[in-house]
Every structure is written in C-alpha cells, then in structure tokens.
Amino acid sequence: MTNKEKPVFGTTEWAASNVNYLKGCSNDCKYCFSKEMAIRFKRKTPENWKEEEINWEAYNKNVKQREGYIMFPSTHDITPQHLDLAIDFLKRLLGNGNKVLIVSKPSFECIKRICDSFADYKDQILFRFTIGSTNNKTLKFWEPNAPDYNERKKALVYAFEAGYQTSISCEPMLDDKIDKVIEDLSQYVTDAIWLGKMNFAIRRLRTNGHLDAENQAAAEQLLEWQNDAAIKQLYNKYKDNPQIKWKESIKKVVGLEVSTIKGEDK
C-alpha cells in the first residue's frame, strides 16, 4: 500500500485540510487528542492546556481557496472568549470562496452570532456539533467546561431553523445510550450523524493528566460498552439508516472499507 492509499482517520475523514489559530482549549476534555499531542510535543502542559493562546501567525494567514471542505477548528473550539476573532477569521475563509466544516461543542452565543453573520454564505457552511450523550452529568464528567446538552441542542436547532446545513458528531460516544441522541436530534440534522468510539482512552487520560482511579474506571466501563459485540449490534440497528455514518473506529470492527481519500465522506 502506498502512502496515498493509507486509510484516513480522525479529522481527515471529514475534511481535506484544517485551520486553527488557538493553542489550547478551555473545554479541557479529558480524552482530547489535541491536548495529548500538545503535551507530547511540549507545546502545552496538562495544567495550562485550558488557557487559550492566540497564534497570531496562523490567525493572520490568508487561506486561499482550497479543494474540498476546510475543517475549522480541529484542535480547539469556538469559545465566547475569542468569538470576535472567530467571526473575522471565518469572514476571510468564506470570502475567499472556501467551503467550511465548522466543528464545535457549541456555545449558543457563538453559533447564533455565526449564523446571524453569515447568512449570505450558507451554501459554503456545514456545521458539525459534537454531542456524545444527552446526559449532562456524563458530558460534565468527560468535557468539564463545555456547554451542557440543552445548550448544544439549542444551538443545533437555531442553525437548522436558520437554514444552515447541520450534522452531529457522536465521537466519542460517551455512554451506551447513543440512541437517545439520535432520537432527540435527528429531525434537526440535514446531513449526517456520525458515530465513533473513544480512541486510545487510557493512554490519552494518562498523558492529559487525568488517569486517577475514578477516570480509569469510567474509561474501562466505556470501553466495555463499546466492545466489538456491542458495536456490531449498534451497526446492525442503524446500518440501513441513511442519516447515520460510521467513523473509522467502527468501520474496522464491522468490516466496512475505510476511505483512503481525505475528506471524501465529509
């Protein structure tokens, strides 16, 4: 298999490229891959990851029109603290003709402002909101500073009713009740609901400074909920639902082909 034929995973399943301008993320999700990478390469520490620093060089870069969707952001979130910067950054991205996949654990304040600001660019925007559970206690445990379920749903409904393309990422699924997310939110989704497992849970908890007894037990429980038999059962339940898409972590379990083309599934 050549380099060009390697299976894609993570953000490359959705977008051919991505852009970011913050170092760190105030959500401080325990399982965060971006936090793990920043710590491994000594760009951040477990303690200061939640402090969002502006990378002005990345922020000021003129991103000319690219093929396919650009994922924004992929290593941080769009938070109220830097919302003005996000609006300005999106103006330049969209103004250059780019199609943007906006990925967020959505703050209603941020999504409302984006929707109200870019009505003329609706055909260039696809929202993807990360919602791994309907249970606020579960969300708070894994994603300590991110918005609760009701706020995320409110943001999704607002974007949907404003006429934008909408989708959901349930990666990672944070409990064994992902059916509730699908049942409650599918009517507000124009594109797809993506399901995926938690990847490298124990390793990331350890690197990110969260591998105490409570978190390890929760991760082990989640891994048990997402064993191969359970994943195959989930797949069989939804395999004929055209609204459901499967991340690479599930495709490998159920025998689906994993794409080798970046952003092919978006």
Image: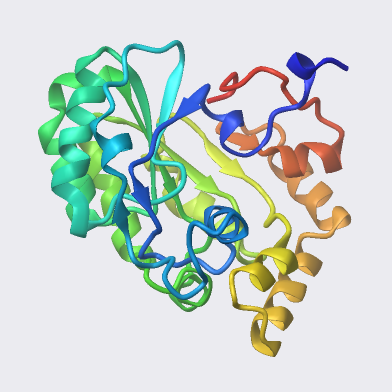
- The x, y position of residue 73, in whole percent, is 39, 41
- The x, y position of residue 212, in whole percent, is 67, 86
Residue sitting at 59 percent across and 50 percent down?
Answer: 171
Residue sitting at 40 percent across and 51 percent down?
Answer: 76
**Which residue lies most toward the bottom here?**
213
75 versus 166 height, above or below: below
- The x, y position of residue 69, in whole percent, is 43, 21
Depth order, front residue of 188/227: 227
Depth order, front residue of 183/28: 28
26 versus 262 height, above or below: below
Identify the image's colour scheme: rainbow, by chain, secondary structure or one colour. rainbow
Q: Quadrant of the N terminus?
A: top right
Residue sitting at 17 percent across and 27 percent down?
Answer: 91
Q: Is residue 194 left or right of residue 7?
A: left
Image quarter of residue 240: top right
Q: Is residue 198 left or right of residue 35?
A: right
Depth order, front residue of 209/83: 209
Residue sitting at 53 percent across and 53 percent down?
Answer: 34
Depth order, front residue of 89/164: 89
Q: Is residue 232 left or right of residue 154?
A: right
Judge whether residue 242 can be spotted in this image: no
Judge whether residue 152 can be spotted in this image: yes
222 versus 53 height, above or below: below
